[in-house]
Image (tube, grey):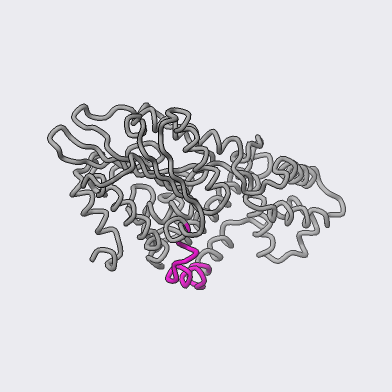
Amino acid sequence: MPYPMPERDLRAYPDSLTPVFISHIGRHGSRYLSSSKFTERLQQRLSRVITPSPKAKALSALCRRIEETTAGRWGALDSLGIAEQRGIAARTWQRFDFLFRERKIRAISSYVPRCIASMDEFTHQLSRMDNRIEIYTSSGRQNNSLLRPWSVDEDYKAYSESSEWRAIYDDYAEKLISPAIASAYLGPEADALSDKEKREFALDLYRIVSGCAASGIKINPIDYLSLADYNALWAVENLDHYLNYSASTLSKAPMDMAAGLLNDIVESIDKAVAGTQQYGCELRFGHAETMIPLLALMRIGGCYYITNYFDTVGLHWRDFYAVPMASNLQMILFKSSTGAYYLRADLNETPVPLIPGNDSLYTPWLKAQDYLQRCLPLYLQL
């Protein structure tokens, strides 16, 4: 889903505290559908229908509309994504302008163009607010270990290729996805499909319908799927994201692959405390698959859920809460009038408790540092 605007003004913080550093990690902004494969597969199925129903014709028209709107820009940042990144940058500058004024800013991104574009739009907005800011940017595969760890982490690769999570996912999808969805669009031609092919058709349909908002295409999803079917398909996709990238009873590998990124964040904040940090702000731009493991590793509320009952995941762990388009986590370091340092964590520009079981939004740095380091795998705690 597109980025939700913060519900309240977050410029206020205690008078005794002064912001001294920000570490920002975010997902790219809203973009066109990441691939043409979904519309192509749907069109292939629909083209075999001898007598298309009004529903089939409407879906075919939607596929053409998506393809025409995207016009070869599959996965590219769109105008909404540009606005999201510029808006987050402008609001961050408004809250903490003296951390940017005539300061040095460092930004890195994944090599994927929509992440680079997100970084460019964010930093472009900062330069519009103050053109004396020095901005140093880096993008490329040299950042994979931090921003695309699933592509280099061997433990995660082994887990991703295992059959255990896939069996749980397939069983859940089989229970929730109605074969009637494919039949409603394909008519008698659906009888020739396997149950798995019918589920794949329904998921492709859900993916294009749910992706329209981020692509700037206005539709009513209920024109294509009943509310019950839409929610069921979301729950299946949500479980896929959960099993693949968050903490679960199956494996710690998805969560632990964010350890290098969390360690990098902690070290950058510690430099600010030590007075050796040369930047007023460090920015990192990645993917949903970057954010989900990090938020789970940190045990951020609503982003970490452990259960053996996987049908309850959607009640407690929701991808649209944790990682909407342009989702971000800002770790803001404050210095008190007494010289002590405090850390505040803002998820999607809303302060959230850092330590489970503790509702405080401002955590003494040494306590925050100890907690975050204990979140790391043992080999990084040494």
Is 78 a magenta residue?
no
State the image quarter where residue 342 is shown.
top left
Name the residue located 77 percent from the left edge and 57 percent from the top edge: 45
Left or right of 200 in this view: 284: left
What number of labels is visible?
0
Front-most of residues 300 and 273: 273
Q: Position of residue 105 (x, y in %)?
A: 39, 41
**x, y (%) of residue 134?**
41, 38
User: Could you say where residue 98 lies in the image, as x and y percent from the top left?
Assistant: 32, 30
Whether residue 112 is situated above or below residue 321 in the rendered picture: below
State which quarter of the image contains the C terminus.
Answer: bottom left
Q: Provide residue 65's location: percent of width, then percent of height.
A: 74, 41
Is residue 23 visible in this depiction of the protein?
yes
Q: Residue at x 18, y 49 (%)?
A: 366
Residue found at x 48% / y 58%: 148
The span picked out in magenta is 148-166
